Image (cartoon, rainbow, N blue to C red):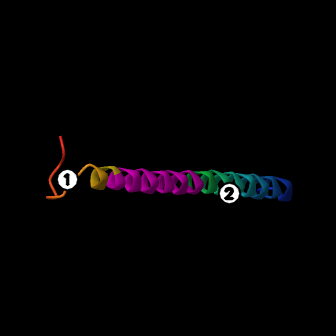
Amino acid sequence: MVSIATLKLACELAGVWMAGMAAILAFVVATVDRLNARIAELETKLEAAQAGGRDSRGGASR
């Protein structure tokens, strides 16, 4: 038979594990969000650079 103390310990450990997993997940989500924002910023800069590098006929200038 399992004692009440063992069950309490198991539940406490499970709670700590779930809190840790939630913290890791929140960190990953925040990191991915920052990376997506940085990618969007770089895409905007690239589009602006490409648009600025075209001549009046729409071709690439050399």
Query: How dense is the environment of label 1, judged by Cα within 10 Å: few (below 14), some, or many (20 and up)?
Result: few
- Verify CB contact (< 8 Å) between mark 2 and mark 1: no
Residue 61 in the image, given as x and y percentages of width and height: 18, 45
Q: Amino acid at mark 1?
A: Asp
Q: Amino acid at mark 2?
A: Met
- Dot 1: element: loop
- Dot 2: element: helix
Residue 32: say if magenta: yes
Which one is earlier in the sequence, the residue at label 2 or at label 1?
2
Q: Quadrant of residue 30?
A: bottom right
Query: How dense is the environment of label 2, judged by Cα within 10 Å: few (below 14), some, or many (20 and up)?
Result: few
Quarter of the image with the C terminus is top left
Residue 11 in the image, given as x and y percentages of width and height: 76, 58
Q: Which residue is mark 1?
A: 55
Taken as a whole, is the magenta stretch helix, strand or loop? helix
Residue that extends furthest to the front in the rendered view of this protein: 56
Residue 13 in the image, given as x and y percentages of width and height: 75, 52
Quarter of the image with the N terminus is bottom right
Q: Which residue is mark 2?
A: 18
Q: Nearer the viewer, residue 28 or 56?
A: 56
> Which-is-in-front pick, marks 2 and 1?
1
Residue that extends furthest to the top in the rendered view of this protein: 62
The residue lying at 69 percent from left, 51 percent from top is 20
Q: Nearer the viewer, residue 42 or 19?
A: 42
Magenta residues span 29-48
Residue 51 in the image, given as x and y percentages of width and height: 28, 56
The residue lying at 22 percent from left, 52 percent from top is 54
Residue 6: say if magenta: no
Horizontal relation, residue 43 to residue 23: left or right: left
